[in-house]
Amino acid sequence: MMDTLPFTAIVLSGGESSRMKTEKGLVSFRGKAMIQHVLETVSKVTNKVILIANHPGYQKLGYPCFPDIFSGVGPLGGIYSGLIYSTTRKNLVLSCDMPFITTQFLETFMNMAGEEDILVPVHEGKPQPLCAVYDQHCREELKARIGSGKLKLQDLFEALKTKRVHVDSKFADASSIFTNINTPEDLIRYQNQKV
C-alpha cells in the first residue's frame, strides 16, 4: 500500500441509477457488489477512502460514508461533497461503476498530479471526469456552479486549470479500465466476458 501518497479516494455512489433500475453500486457483479471491485483496487493506492452515497446499503461496506450536501445536482454535487469531507489537498474521484480499474493505472495516473486544479484522463477523445484527480482549490468553483445551476462537468475543465492525459497511447488496457457497467444488459455482457 502506498501510504505516502497524500490522496483521498472519493468513490461516488450517489447517482440515480436510472438505467440500471436498481442501486448500481450494490448490484452483484462477479460475486460481489460492483462498488467492491473499485474499493478493493483503490484501497491499494491510498489508505484514505470515503464514499459519497445516499443509499443506506453502502454503510455496511466498512468505509466512511457521507450523503450528498446538495441533492439532485448530479456528479458535480458528489465531487463537491467529497472535497468537503476529504482531509487531503489532492483527491482521486472514482465512479462506483468501473469494476475493471487497475492499481497500476491508478498509481501511474496519480503520480502525474501536480499544481493543476484537475488532472483528467482522456479516453477515445473524451475526458473522464469520474476517474480524475481534483485539488481542494476546485471547491469554490464547484459551489458557485451548483448555486447557478451550471452542472456540466465538461464546462468545469475550461474554468479551472486542467491537465489532460491522453491515456490510450500510454495504457494498453485503457478500453477495459474505462468500461462502465450502466445497464442490466452490461451486467450480463461483462459477467463472464473478458473485456
Image (cartoon, rainbow, N blue to C red):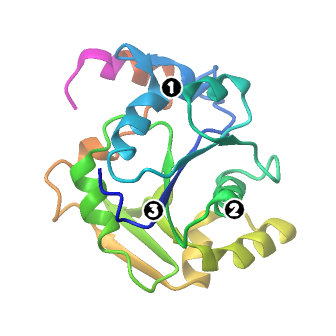
Three-letter code, disc 2? Tyr
Q: Are marks 1 and 3 in contact (CB under 8 Å)?
A: no
Q: Secondary structure at mark 2?
A: helix
Q: Quadrant of residue 193?
A: top left
Q: Secondary structure at mark 3?
A: strand
Q: Between tags 1 and 3, which lies in front?
A: 3
Asked whether 190 falls inside the magenta stretch, the response is yes
Q: Earlier in the sequence, mark 1 or mark 3?
A: 3
Q: Residue 62: x percent and y percent?
A: 56, 30
Q: Is 195 or 5 nearer to us in this picture? A: 5
User: How packed is label 1: few (under 14 Cα within 10 Å), some, or many (20 or more)?
Assistant: some
Residue plotted at (34% across, 40% down): 41
Q: Residue 58: x percent and y percent?
A: 63, 28
Q: Secondary structure at mark 1?
A: loop
The residue range painted magenta reads 189-195
**54 lies above or below 158:** above
The CA distance from mark 1 to mark 3 is 23 Å
The CA distance from mark 2 to mark 1 is 26 Å
What mark, if any, has residue 5 been given in the picture?
Answer: none
Q: Quadrant of residue 98?
A: top left
Q: Residue 76: x percent and y percent?
A: 67, 59
Three-letter code, disc 3? Ala
Q: Quadrant of residue 79?
A: bottom right
Reading the image, the residue beneath label 1 is: 183
The CA distance from mark 2 to mark 3 is 13 Å
Q: Earlier in the sequence, mark 2 or mark 3?
A: 2
Three-letter code, disc 1? Thr
What mark, if any, has residue 132 been given in the picture?
Answer: 3
Reading the image, the residue beneath label 2 is: 80
Q: Residue 157: x percent and y percent?
A: 54, 76
Residue plotted at (38% across, 15% down): 188
Q: Earlier in the sequence, mark 2 or mark 1?
A: 2
